[in-house]
Structure formats: structure tokens, C-alpha cells
Image (tube, rainbow, N blue to C red):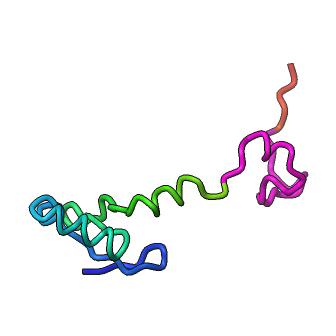
Amino acid sequence: MTSLIWGVFMRAWAVQDAKARFSELLATCVQNGPQMVTYRGEEAAVLVPVMEWKRLQTSDKPTLKELLLSKKNRFDIRLPERGLKKRRKSIDF
């Protein structure tokens, strides 16, 4: 069984096969890229080559300081226009 993740076709290994043939799983991962491990038919984990892992960890993630000081929009959230929401009547005391 294969699936497409990150633009790469990877083989899905049942957990019992992954345990029994870990050396083969590791070699396949190093040669062919990420490998999916399934548990009871559900996707559970992915074994990723270390270079891919390092690339993902150091991908272009701005720091909080950079985000706060940037001039780019921080949020892409559509807010409803004011006055269109139904409000509760206020209680007079």
C-alpha cells in the first residue's frame, strides 16, 4: 500500500511488519524518503530521513519578535460587520 504525502509516494508498513523488518524499513526510508507506519489500519506515524527532519525543523519559521514587528497582516480572519449580530437585551437595574 502506498500513499502520497509531501509530494512523495511512500509505502505503508503495518506496525507488526515495521517491528519485524525494522532494518528494511530504515533502509527504505533512507533510500526512498518518508515511510508510513499504520496501527490497526490507521495511519499512526511516519519515519522520515534525518535530512528531511532537519529541513522541516529549520524551515522558515519567524520568531515572535519578527511576527510582532512585521508590517504584514498577522491574521487572515473575516470578521462580521458590526451591528449585524443579534444581541441580548440589556437588563435595567
75, 61: nearer the viewer:
61
Based on the picture, tell me whether residue 74 belongs to the magenta stretch: yes
51, 35: nearer the viewer:
51
Q: In which quarter of the image is residue 13?
A: bottom left
Q: Which residue lies furthest to the top in this view?
A: 93
Look at 48% across and 73% down and name the residue there.
Answer: 6
Give the quarter of the figure containing the C terminus.
Answer: top right
Q: Residue 65: x, y in percent?
A: 78, 39
Q: Residue 19: x, y in percent?
A: 13, 58
Based on the picture, tell me whether residue 20 belongs to the magenta stretch: no
59 to the left or right of 89 = left
Which region shows up in magenta?
61-88
80 to the left or right of 8 = right
Q: Please, is residue 78 above or below residue 86 in the view?
A: below
Q: Please, is residue 8 above or below residue 57 in the view?
A: below
Q: In which quarter of the image is residue 43?
A: bottom left
Give the quarter of the figure containing the N terminus.
Answer: bottom left
